Image (cartoon, rainbow, N blue to C red):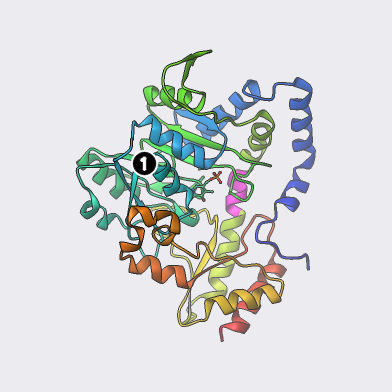
Amino acid sequence: MRPIQMVDTSTQYQKIKREIDAAVIAVMESSQFIGGKVVNEFSTNLAKYNGSKHVIPCANGTDALQIAMMALGLKAGDEVITPSFTYIATVEVAALLGIKPIFVEVDQHSFCIDPSLIEAAITPKTKAIIPVHLYGHAVDMEQIMAIANKHGLFVIEDNAQGIGNEVIFSDGSIKKTGSIGHIGCTSFYPSKNLGAFGDGGAIFTEDDQLANQLRMIASHGQSKRYYHDVIGCNSRLDAIQAAILDIKLSHLDEYIAARRKAADYYDAAFANHPKIKTPFRAANNNHVFHQYTLTLIDVDRDALNEFLAEQKVPSMIYYPVPAHKQKMFDAFGGSAYQLPVTDWLTERVISLPIHTELDQEQQDFIISKVLEFIK
Ligand SMILES: *Cc1c(COP(=O)(O)O)cnc(C)c1O
C-alpha cells in the first residue's frame, strides 16, 4: 500500500507532469512573470467555469476577502455577520480593517452558518454577510440572499473550500458557489480543491463597477499606471501559478468527482454506525468534499486522532478552536459569545484523508483503523 497522506499533491502532479512542466517552462522563457497573457487566459477560463462575469486574480484567499471588503467600502465600526466555526482568515481580515465580526451559530448538520439565526444578529451597523462554504458544502444561499436583499446587506461568499459546488435554487436555476453573492472569494492554496504550487487567490463578481474597484484595489489603487485613486494593496497572482492553475482547472470536475467517489465509499462504510455521523449533504447543493469530516458521538476524538497517527493514518481537526475563542478576538468580546453548536462540533469533528489520489486499498485501511478504535 502507498503511504496515506492527508492530501497527495505529489501523485496528482505526476499524472499531469508533462503538461505542467511545459507550461512552467513556457512562462520562464517568456519572462512575463507578472500579469500578461497567461494570467488573463486563466482568469477568463475560471470566469467561464464559474459562470461569473469577472474574475480578479490576486495573491491568496485572505487577500481576496480583504480586497472584497475594501471594494464594498466597509470601514472601521461596521459589522459583518460570519460563522465562528471557520478558518481564521475569514474574520481576521475584517478585524484588520477595524470591522467587527459578529459570530452567528452554524447548523450542526451542514457545519455552515444557520440562516435562520442571521436576522437576530443584524444591527444598524451591519453591512455584509460572509457565508463560508465549509468543507465544500454550500451554505443555503437562497436564504442568505433573501435576508441580504431584505436588509440591504452585501454578501461576500468565502468559497475557498467550495469551488465547483453547484447550488440548485427553488426556481430550478443552478449557480456555482462564488457567483451568487455580490462578491465571491477563493484560495488556490496547494491543498485546496483547485490548488496552485504556491499561493494564489481570486475574486468573482457580476458587477462591472465593482470589478473595476476590486482590480484597482488589488493593484495599489491604480486607475492607470502611477495614478492612484484609492488606497489599495499589492496582491497579484503570478504567471507561473496561473499557468499551473489553468491546467488543473481543466481537470477540476474530474478531481471533484474523485473526491465525491471517495466520500461515497466512506459514507457506505460508516453508514448507520451509532457513534459516527457521516457528512450531511443538502439536496440543493453538490458537496465538493474539500474535507471529509465525521462528527463523533461519545468517542474520545483526540484519542482517535492519536491512534490513527500511530497507525500512519493522518487525520485533522478543522478547527480545534473556533474564532470566537481565539485570543485575537478577546478585544472584540469573543469570549462573551454563547455558541453551543459551534463548541459542540469543535469537540467532535475529525477529518479523514480525502483527495484525488486516494485508492480503495488506502480507504479500506483507514476505515478499518477508525472502526477498530470506535467499536
Ligand atoms: C484557505 C482558506 C482561506 C484563506 O486562503 P489563503 O489562500 O490561505 O489565504 C480563507 N477562508 C477559508 C475558509 C479557507 O479555507
Query: Badge 1: few (under 14), some or many (20 or more) residues near its Cα, within 10 Å?
Result: some
> Which quadrant does the N terminus fall into?
bottom right
Tell me where residue 44 appears, x and y as whole percent.
55, 27
Marker count (numbered): 1
Q: Is residue 228 part of the magenta span, yes or no?
A: no
| Residue found at the very far front of the displayed protein | 331
When asked about the image quadrant of residue 75, the answer is top left
When asked about the image quadrant of residue 325, the answer is bottom left
Q: Is the stretch drawn in magenta largely helix, strand or loop? A: helix
Q: Is residue 4 above or below residue 330?
A: below
The answer to whether one can see residue 170 in this image is: no
Tell me where residue 61 appears, x and y as whole percent.
52, 41
Q: Is residue 252 part of the magenta span, yes or no?
A: yes
Q: Is residue 282 left or right of residue 61?
A: left
Query: In this view of the protein, which residue sits in the foreground, 161 or 303?
Result: 303
Q: Is residue 186 above or below residue 270?
A: above
Tell me where residue 131 appears, x and y as whole percent.
38, 49
> Which quadrant does the C terminus fall into?
bottom right
Q: Is residue 143 above or below residue 320?
A: above
Q: Please give the range of residues in magenta.
A: 251-257
Residue indicated by mark 1? 98
Task: For ligand 1, tell me if the residue under mark 1 lies within 8 Å.
Answer: no
Q: Is residue 242 left or right of residue 201?
A: right
Q: Amino acid at mark 1?
A: Gly
The answer to whether one can see residue 143 in this image is: yes
